[in-house]
């Protein structure tokens, strides 16, 4: 149907151009009255042609948007099915292996949940594009105002063709009237042709104003609605990508934190499992042979006489690995001396 309309439109334009060429030939050849060609009507015709071309280009652009959005929704729906399957597999693996404490299990669960959230955001985007862009523009393409304005333009073109034919008929009758002056029959025919031409011009002028107003309204509507739908589509895609970026950033931070935590645990386990050196073993063995008791009396005595017959405070006793008996310490300096002696012997 659309192809037939295009062919009919091209045929009308071709016929109109031929009639204008014939009209110019008559005017130039026989020096007819140039007032037969109405300049206002010609301007209206050119304006209508420009408006018609604008509406046709906008309609084709809207149709391209509708087809593209429809294809985008179909491809994205198929892609969503694949990503949903991947998210489910990741969550299943993480839930089955999270008891083993592997970082991959926790990361898989986070990956699956994050992509499930992203798919919900994409579902909202596709729903918006389908309802607010696809359906809205599709209705405008087949809307009544556009079809009504086009029908008025078609009627205008047909009447204009009739008027051009009538102008050519008037010019022929004027030529005959001049050649056969005084012929009443030719004069009556000329008056009748001029009267019909006047009626056609009046009808064409009114129809031209009506068609121009209708086409201008359609042009404004097409431009405004198409721009609004494009802006709404950009806003929806922008919101989707912002939400998706937020989800991915959160997932990335969680996975990096889990990676660092896992590396720290592995490093601690490796450090704890390292074997001790011989020097550390000898030092710990030597320290085990030393037993000190500070601030506690032996044999239930709080003090013990010295060789000078004076009582001194009891500090402690020490057993050295090279001494056969326990040595009693009565002064703090003696205790420090034996400690230093022990570490020197260990070295």
Image (cartoon, rainbow, N blue to C red):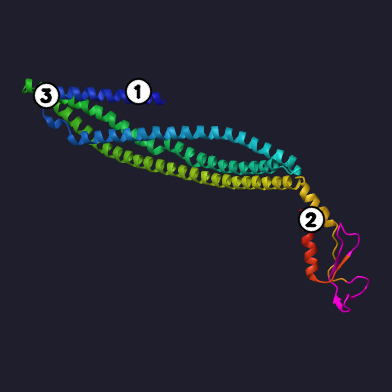
Secondary structure under badge 1?
helix
| Discs 1, 3 touching: Cβ within 8 Å | no
User: Where does residue 266 sit, x and y in percent of width and height?
Assistant: 71, 45
User: Where does residue 122 sit, x and y in percent of width and height?
Assistant: 56, 41
Specify whether residue 321 is painted magenta: yes
User: Where does residue 83 sit, x and y in percent of width and height?
Assistant: 61, 36
- The residue positioned 32% from the left and 32% from the top of the image is 53
Quadrant that contains the N terminus: top left
Q: Which residue is mark 3?
A: 28
Residue 345 numbered tag: 2
- The residue positioned 36% from the left and 33% from the top of the image is 57
Left-right relation of 42 to 123: left
Sooner in the amino-acid sequence: mark 2 or mark 3: 3
Magenta part of the chain: 297-326
Q: Which of 126/136 is in front?
A: 126
User: Where does residue 337 sit, x and y in percent of width and height?
Assistant: 78, 65
Kindly report the secondary structure that dominates the magenta region of the rendered protein: loop
């Amino acid at each position: 149907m659309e192809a037939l309309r295009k062919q009919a439109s091209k045929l009308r334009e071709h016929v109109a151009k031929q009639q204008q060429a014939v009209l110019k030939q008559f005017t130039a050849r026989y020096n007819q009255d140039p007032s037969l060609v109405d300049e206002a009507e010609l301007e209206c015709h050119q304006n209508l042609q420009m408006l018609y071309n604008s509406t046709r280009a906008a309609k084709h652009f809207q149709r391209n948007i509708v087809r593209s959005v429809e294809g985008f929704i179909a491809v994205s729906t198929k892609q969503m099915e694949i990503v949903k399957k991947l998210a489910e597999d990741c969550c299943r693996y993480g839930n089955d292996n999270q008891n083993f404490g592997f970082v991959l299990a926790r990361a898989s669960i986070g990956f699956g949940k994050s992509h499930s959230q992203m798919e919900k955001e994409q579902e909202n985007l596709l729903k918006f594009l389908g309802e607010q862009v696809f359906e809205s523009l599709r209705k405008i393409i087949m809307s009544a105002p556009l079809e009504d304005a086009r029908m008025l333009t078609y009627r205008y073109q047909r009447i204009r063709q009739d008027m051009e034919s009538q102008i050519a008929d008037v010019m022929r009758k004027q030529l005959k009237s001049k050649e056969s002056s005084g012929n009443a029959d030719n004069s009556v025919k000329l008056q009748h042709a001029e009267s019909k031409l006047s009626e056609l011009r009046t009808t064409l002028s009114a129809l031209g104003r009506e068609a121009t107003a209708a086409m201008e309204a359609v042009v404004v509507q097409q431009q405004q609605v198409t721009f609004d739908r494009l802006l709404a589509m950009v806003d929806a895609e922008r919101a989707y990508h912002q939400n998706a970026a937020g989800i991915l950033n959160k997932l990335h931070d969680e996975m990096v934190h889990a990676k660092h935590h896992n590396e720290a645990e592995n490093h601690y386990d490796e450090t704890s499992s390292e074997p001790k050196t011989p020097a550390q073993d000898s030092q710990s063995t030597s320290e085990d042979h030393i037993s000190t008791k500070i601030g506690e009396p032996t044999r239930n005595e709080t003090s013990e006489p010295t060789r000078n017959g004076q009582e001194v405070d009891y500090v402690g006793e020490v057993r050295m690995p090279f001494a056969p008996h326990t040595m009693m310490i009565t002064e703090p300096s003696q205790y420090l001396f034996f400690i230093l002696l022990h570490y020197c012997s260990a070295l």
